[in-house]
Image (spheres, rainbow, N blue to C red):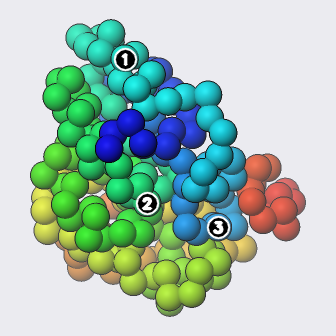
Amino acid sequence: MNAHLRVGGFTPFTAIDYPGELAAVVFCQGCPWRCRYCHNGHLLPARAPSTHGWEQVVNFLADRRGLLDAVVFSGGEPTAQEALEGAVTEVRKLGFKVGLHTAGIYPRRLRRLIPRLDWVGLDIKALPENYPAISGVARSGAAPWQSAKLLAEAGIPLQVRLTHHPRLTSHSELDQIRQKLRLLGIPHLEIQPCNSAQALDETLRLSL
């Protein structure tokens, strides 16, 4: 049920989280991975105290119809929650476009969501075989690349980005990732700098 969407944070206004649109961002609580450079450690536990309830968020959005264009579900990992589908449907009924930030961890859930999404920001972290060194989870590399293929085939507006820390991703691997994405029909990889000062892995917090 929508009321059970676990909200770990909420940004009422942003012009940078959905390209070309004024949006609000719902940060969904919980992620099964522990990526070394993650700077949102408070969102990782599946259940944690929050000052934001889903009904509170919906009431706020209802008052912002005509002022905001879109709502972005971010995280954590939004697709980790089964309640996301209902929440997305509810937001669409309010008249908003829907964006999704995801690491592509659950391709089957993503497939069901695609018809109700207007834009996706997909985080690709590495070549498939190198994912465990970043995510901390064995055999974690197949699902994100399946999600990339799924999104490319669906033709949905898509931004694929990679958070770069030179100790985790070499320039050679970046080139291989770009080539692999191009073969899927994704022509551009957006490189994001690592927020090393707040990285989950304290060894990455040293100056680069």
Q: Indicate which disc residue 200 carries.
A: none
Identify residue for label 1.
Answer: 59
Please name the residue shown 54% across and 28% down the image: 52
Asked if residue 13 lies left or right of residue 131, the reply is left
What secondary structure is found at the residue carrying circle 1? helix
Q: Are marks 3 and 2 in contact (CB under 8 Å)?
A: no
Please name the residue shown 43% across and 31% down the image: 54
Q: Residues within 10 Å of mark 2 (few under 14, many from 20)?
A: some
Percent coordinates x, y for residue 95 in the rendering: 17, 24
Please name the residue shown 49% across and 62% down the image: 162
6 over 200 or under it: above or below? above
* Alpha-carbon span between mark 3 and mark 2: 14 Å
Asked if residue 157 lies left or right of residue 24, the reply is left
Mark earlier in primary sequence (1, 2): 1
Asked where in the image residue 135 lies, by quadrant, the reply is bottom right
**Amino acid under label 3?**
Arg
Mark earlier in primary sequence (3, 2): 3
What secondary structure is found at the residue carrying circle 2? helix
Asked where in the image residue 99 lies, by quadrant, the reply is top left
**Amino acid under label 2?**
Ala
Quarter of the image that includes the C terminus: bottom right
* Alpha-carbon span between mark 3 and mark 1: 32 Å
**Amino acid under label 1?**
Asn
Q: Indicate which disc residue 34 carries.
A: 3
Quarter of the image that includes the N terminus: top left
Asked where in the image residue 123 lies, by quadrant, the reply is bottom left
Front tag of 3 and 1:
1
Q: Residues within 10 Å of mark 1 (few under 14, many from 20)?
A: few
Please name the residue shown 51% across and 38% down the image: 7
Q: Indicate which disc residue 80 carries.
A: 2
